[in-house]
Image: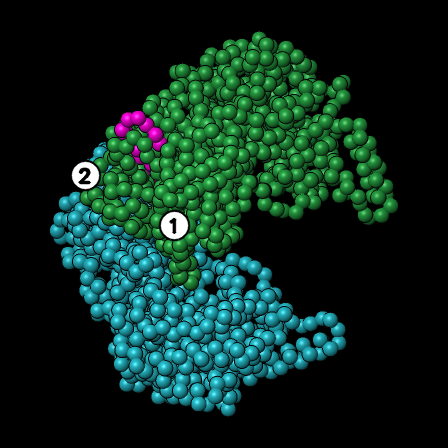
Chain colours: A cyan, B green
Amino acid sequence: MILSPSHIIRLRLDILCLALTLCILNFSCKSELKTDAKAEVKTETKNQKPVLSLSNSEANEIKELLNSNEILNNSFEEQKTKADKAIVNGIEVPVPKDPGGGYSHEKHKRNYGEMYAAGIAYMITRDSKYSEFVTNMLLAYADMYPQLPLHPKRKENHPAGKLFWQGLNESVWLVNTIQAYNLVSDAISPEDKKTIENNVFRKVAEFISVDSKKTFNKIHNHGTWAVAGVGMTGYVLKDQDMVDRALYGSNKDKKTGFLKQIDMLFSPEGYYSEGPYYQRYAMMPFMLFGQAIQRNQPDLKIFEYRDQLLGKAVTTVLQLTDENGAFFPFNDALKEKNYLTSELIFASNIAYAYYNDSSLLPITHEHNKVSISGAGLSVAKALQNFNAREYEKKSLLITDGKDGNDGGLALLRMPNLQRNEKLTTVFKFASQGMGHGHFDRLSLFLYDGKQEIIQDYGAARFLNVESKQGGRYLPENKTWAKQTIAHNTVTVDETSQFGANVKASSEVSPKLLFSNVRNKDLQIVSAKEENAYDDIAMQRTIALVEGKNSEQPPFVIDVYRISSANKHQYDLNFMYQGHLMETNFEYLKANTLSPLGTKNGYQHLWKLAEGKSDHNLATFTWLNKNRFYSISSLVSEDSKMVFSILGANDPEFNLRNDASYMLRENDKKDHVFVNIIEPHGNFDPKLESVQNPHSRVKHIQLLFSDENYTIVKAIFNNNENYTLAIVNNNHDPHKKHTVTVEDQEFQWTGNYNLKTN
Amino acid sequence: MILSPSHIIRLRLDILCLALTLCILNFSCKSELKTDAKAEVKTETKNQKPVLSLSNSEANEIKELLNSNEILNNSFEEQKTKADKAIVNGIEVPVPKDPGGGYSHEKHKRNYGEMYAAGIAYMITRDSKYSEFVTNMLLAYADMYPQLPLHPKRKENHPAGKLFWQGLNESVWLVNTIQAYNLVSDAISPEDKKTIENNVFRKVAEFISVDSKKTFNKIHNHGTWAVAGVGMTGYVLKDQDMVDRALYGSNKDKKTGFLKQIDMLFSPEGYYSEGPYYQRYAMMPFMLFGQAIQRNQPDLKIFEYRDQLLGKAVTTVLQLTDENGAFFPFNDALKEKNYLTSELIFASNIAYAYYNDSSLLPITHEHNKVSISGAGLSVAKALQNFNAREYEKKSLLITDGKDGNDGGLALLRMPNLQRNEKLTTVFKFASQGMGHGHFDRLSLFLYDGKQEIIQDYGAARFLNVESKQGGRYLPENKTWAKQTIAHNTVTVDETSQFGANVKASSEVSPKLLFSNVRNKDLQIVSAKEENAYDDIAMQRTIALVEGKNSEQPPFVIDVYRISSANKHQYDLNFMYQGHLMETNFEYLKANTLSPLGTKNGYQHLWKLAEGKSDHNLATFTWLNKNRFYSISSLVSEDSKMVFSILGANDPEFNLRNDASYMLRENDKKDHVFVNIIEPHGNFDPKLESVQNPHSRVKHIQLLFSDENYTIVKAIFNNNENYTLAIVNNNHDPHKKHTVTVEDQEFQWTGNYNLKTN
């Protein structure tokens, strides 16, 4: 937020009011002050040193508030304790030698964290031991850096660093270290400043922006870290050319650089194409550099840029989390990561400070920590009178692609009234998401409250665990986690979408056909993918339905329509979490286990059992944390139901032993998978009672399907029934449709219709 | 507790004091009142109706306190709401027809719960709609019961009921229903009373105590439910013969009956031989009947009986829980069960009321509910000024057997200072525990804080889940869960202990050799089992050690010594929970999976991999909830390390897919397994940092082993080392021992010695 004249007047009035009340009696107008002070992030006057995140006056205010503001005090004490420990341990700047996880790698990472902490400690305490620590460490870097070759453990086909095996780490080092330097620079002698600026910052910035130009100009999070580091360094060194290259690209032609990254990497809603796990990581340089730009070139109105894109991006990444706060684990993602991560403390603090968006306060409250910065100060003050409430997660349609035309994501959330929890369905029809993307188009996943019910595997990786290939992505990430069969979508002929070719997949995206996520009783999204396989068009429609009987939880109608001129095998897989309770069909379990297939991820699944049904409804029920779930499927006598468990061809125990249930159709041209996915009961171990352990679905019918319409009907045990009509072509919310099936006429207006009896 | 004259005087003084203060000013002497009022459970005077759990005066006091005592109010409201709903739904007493989980079964269960709730509601509100509900339902039972044959779905070789397929359920019905009747009987006409008493209670009591005499006289929890129901009925019907048969057995010769059950079913510390899962269940009739005896025959001093055995039994079952409050899942046990279960609300309330044992209050506080009874009233009053604190779990040696000579259990608990949590090792060397016992002698399990690290499988059962064989024990409970290989102990020649014969196993027990569980730095227990296999003697010594470096978590030294005149295969299995991270040995994973064996549980394990080591230390490290654990084992070139996963020969998906790691020794006569089991690090997903991912153990040595002594040494990476000397024979805590190994002389006093360098 930019301070307008009216804001300044209100601010002054508030300050006057505060002064008066403090003088007269023990009664303050704090709450009014708070409201507007939220946005109080001052632009420093020109004759002071440039400021990246924390000005002298902000530091003074923080110092004054430490006694009365617990969160601020704790956050500061954490930094100060870290700095104190670092000073006791002494300075060590080792010659770069080890890869990720190794000693020199971890030491250089620790060094920037400690310099940053000491910088904070100096700003608040003004104790010179902190500034000396930063200065001396930077002088040690100044001694070493100019002579450094490329890192000895650099990887082929991967941009190298000098301090680190990867160039990315070098940029992160710079983002942190330039802030540390900025915080203490007042206390450094002109001579040392010169040494440090010339031998460290200019050298590192040159390495990143010139020697590693390709990465620097990349429209990618590695590029963002690079331009953020270099741009912030430019402000501190008062080198506008450096800043301009960061903002507009090496050639300053705006074809690359920070603004172009904002243009290209986000959808209009602020979705970052690599997905939430990487968005979390990317938001840190986006917001830190954004903050530095706002403070040093306020005329650029960076936080207003592209219709307040940076603010939207913070909100969107927070919405892309489950009820534990963990990021939806699609693409390469570690499930352990949630919004309590330090990157999102910085990002949400800055977003709050500049957008004055109080919807973020529940998150910052959960953080129980702020960044020691002007932004963190705003948050800490706002939290002082904040009544804890939950962060509001909404049903959202989030488009992908810079223009919002490259498919997207639907987050369908519906309260489960009985349990005071939400049922959440994620439907992914987004673009590839670059190198960390998975071949998972039209995939679905389901959460009940805090539990994963139908999961996305996430990434095959044990981050920073040395024994698991140095903590890098494991080979099984490529051979399993990225493959289509690892996802809750259809794999054709045991081959992944686009033949698992990133380049081919990146060129085209699925398309949203229609959606309505605002309805209380019915949230529905339909998307199509026509390029993943040569001769196949696929359309999936996901509807989250609150049934007639509101004592029962909502359920999902899943209609997956495939058309092709040729015969294929279609495998619709569900990676369910839990324990099989019952099926309404016979199956045979194997006495020796063999892999389900030989390639494209199939080689990693042990085939446990195969079943067939002699009627046209296949029901599979499982238990997850004392709750029952069922998938009821329209099948024929030729359909196969296949159970498998992950872990085959996994020589080093890299994979989890997760379960899956697959509906397999052979020799089909056109096919429509119709499934009802329902939570439906629970086991109470205290009372030893079981409620509704069986699926409520009695029949599923495919009433009609052609290129224009699909009509399905689900009939429940109590004869409640739901008829869903879907328009497959020429979508128009106002168009009237009529379909006659046998004697029955179906009429409706718009892209879909759900009729309930 | 019995009210002594001094108690009564103090009580009167308290009441006077209260009255005075309430009159004079708004200041009360509540806290002093509370202290003694805890034990205020009045013996009703002779001319009133007999009381089982709640007298009129107690009911009046509860009514008065409802406004001011939230826990009492909520507990009462729960009962009242249940009764109100039941009245709205009307009375239905179906003809018995269905087995467990079926409609008539569940309905009769619900009926007694609703009658009990209505009885409570009547006592507090005196609203006749509640007494009428109970009366009318009992009249309906009176109409039906006398004509009932044995239940049509009774099981062969299982005592049958009439209302229920199992006699046990009939007893439970009676325990609940006689209380309901007792609560409302004042309001029933003499004529109806006669009908109900003659056609229901005398008939049911006769069926249970005469027709089903065998169960009634059983020293077993089914017997306890039977005598409790009949004995309580005897008090209410003023039929002392009925009471005496319940107390002293059918023949009133004290060879069976309640007192004999107390004598025989518990060890001196109050351990119930079936294990904690069934002890939880058994404590309800023990305590309810105990309470009824105390109120109606106080001279029997039942709560003092056998050195306050009933009180000890409540404490012991509460101590036999993990940090989640779940019962240690040995023998047939469901892991979902914890001390919040209703049986333990009754039992802990009664124990608190009669023993005035404030150590129970944290549990009753966690219950957040009391029974609506005199005992519950005492607890509710005590909780009003209770400051929440954790229930104190201790390191305990709990003997088994009525004289404490049949082995036992060791609970070793040591704080993990870094994490402010406890490491808990359970060592089981108890008797068979009757029909629900497992063949698990000398088994070990490990918990870190709230996490299971090395688990006991528990029972193969989905309680009350109809689709899983009606919720009964599954076939795999016998073929897997009870077998020795399912436990963390040694299986010889792929055969379970005692050939899985309960009768043979019940005749002999393991023996405790020595123990010390009170030491801060070292808790140690040694036990032997010499009967499980014909020609084999086994001794296991478990030591929980706080290392020299208190920044590292405690670790376990596990020395398992086997001697035999003949050659055997010894399999020491560990059912670890988590994901394999690394081994220091090579292994080969199979490309098709086959079962590890053909019988005795082996048929259920898929063999995943087998490894061998070319040096004498095998290290296996796994990750559980972001923490690292290792088992380091002394091995030879002939040792095999086998990885498997559960689920083979499991045609209906009844088993969980749990992992195991086995040390296998072939063709050995004598052998000593020496293992160090250590937690040693963690992964912090927020910081993305990994600490201590590798085992700290560098060498393990077996310095000496014969029939008299075993001496082992573990050397850590930092050269810290631990030498543990164990006496195998002639145990005496004061005896001096000298062993010379090569040039080194080991001298110590007592049954063990740990030397640390």
Identify the residue at image location x=56%, y=59%: A388
In this view, the residue in front, A581 or B190, is A581
A56 left or right of B719 in image: right
Q: Which residue is mark 1?
A: B715
Determine whether the residue tagged by mark 2 lies in a helix, strand or loop. loop
Three-letter code for the amino acid on which mark 2 is drawn = Asp
Q: Residues within 10 Å of mark 2 (few under 14, many from 20)?
A: few
Identify the residue at image location x=50%, y=80%: A131
Residue A73 percent location from the top left of the image: 58, 68
- Our reading of the magenta stretch's main secondary structure is strand
Q: Which residue is mark 2?
A: A638
Q: Is B563 colored magenta in this rendering?
A: yes
Q: Is residue B400 above or below residue A665?
A: above
Magenta span covers which residues? Answer: B562-574
Q: Is A9 colored magenta in this rendering?
A: no
Q: Is residue A571 something that shows in the picture?
A: no
Determine whether the residue tagged by mark 1 lies in a helix, strand or loop. strand
